Image (cartoon, rainbow, N blue to C red):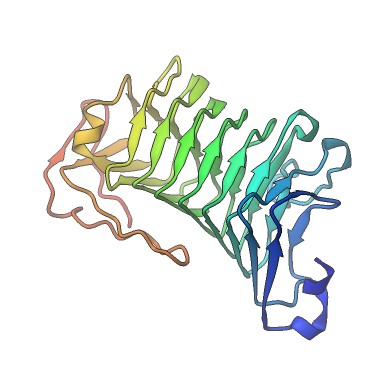
Amino acid sequence: MDKLRNETVAGTKVRFELSAVVHELSAPMHIDGSVWASEVSIVGDEGAVIRLPLASERRQLSAFNGTVRAAVVLSTQLLIQLHGVAFQGGASTFGVAAVVVESGEFVMHNCTVRNVQGSRAFHANGGSSTILSSLFEANLAGAIVAASGGKLFIGSSALVNNSAENGGALAVTGNLTEVALVATRIARNSAKVRGGGLFVSSGNVILANSTLLEKNSAPDGAALHLSGGITACELSPFEHLQDPFISGSLLLISRLFVPVSQTRYQPPRPIGLTQGSRRRCQACRRVSPRW
């Protein structure tokens, strides 16, 4: 990582390649204003694993709320891309997340995040994050959270067997937060209180391209718990959800399609918002989303 802070790489794209072994982090990777490179790529060979830093050695990195610690933190206006990397947590890394995005652009493609404990695995707390063709599995404090106006696009991915207090797979909060879930499977997640699959307290959320919620569980809102914000989803999958809780705004559309970007995050422009049939839920008011 010292290479990124050398003036010789100013304005250039830097690429790191990880071999197919377990890589123990001696220190977290903090991409901040001291980095001279304009873009950073981390590419793993098949079988490349990053083990999260030990809890006893973790550093305070995030300026978000004074509590989030992570293996990778992006807190400056750069583009960071990860491809083919697996993050592995465990009891010894309790409280350490895999990724925290506070600003800039973060792209994760064909990655796996597994067994993160004591913290959400991925925090989209600002900036723009794109997760493509990736797996979040068996994370014990929830897979992903989007908050504080963060922009998050999840495409062709799977969030399975994650658990949390609220929103086992995904929690969304913050009035300016935007999330799009496209062609993504959310299955067998659980919450102790609300929203086994998805918990939305505020912000704008799209579930499109037959995004599937199945076999999730929670005492209140087994599949999803919408207590605020605006959520738009396709009518057909929604009709088969188990025990949804809705007090926020829900927009149901006969067909909702969002193109999956293969590069950076793009603000979602769903096709069908103005043409599909719409249904008003008894527990919500229909409000046009701000996309």
User: Residue 151: in sight, yes or no?
Assistant: yes
Q: Give the x, y percent position of residue 156.
A: 39, 49
Above or below, comparing residue 278 to residue 26 in the picture: above
Front residue (pair 154, 137): 137
Give the residue drawn at x 50%, y 37%: 171
Q: Could you say which quadrant of the image residue 13 lies in?
A: bottom right
Residue at the top extreme?
219
Count of numbered labels shown in the rendering: 0
Give x and y (percent) for residue 272: 18, 54
Evaluate whether residue 248 shows in this view.
no
The residue lying toward the viewer, choosing from 65 and 181, is 181
Residue at coordinates 70% horizontally, 53% vertically from top-left?
Answer: 72
Q: Which quadrant would residue 217 be assigned to in this image?
A: top left
Quadrant of the snapshot with the C terminus: bottom left
Q: Residue at x 71, y 43 (%)?
A: 68
Describe residue 44's horizontal placement relative to residue 283 as left or right. right
Locate residue 239, reporting x and y percent: 21, 28
The location of residue 288, given as percent across then percent down, is 25, 49
Q: Quadrant of the N terminus?
A: bottom right
Residue at x 84%, y 47% (from the top left corner): 59
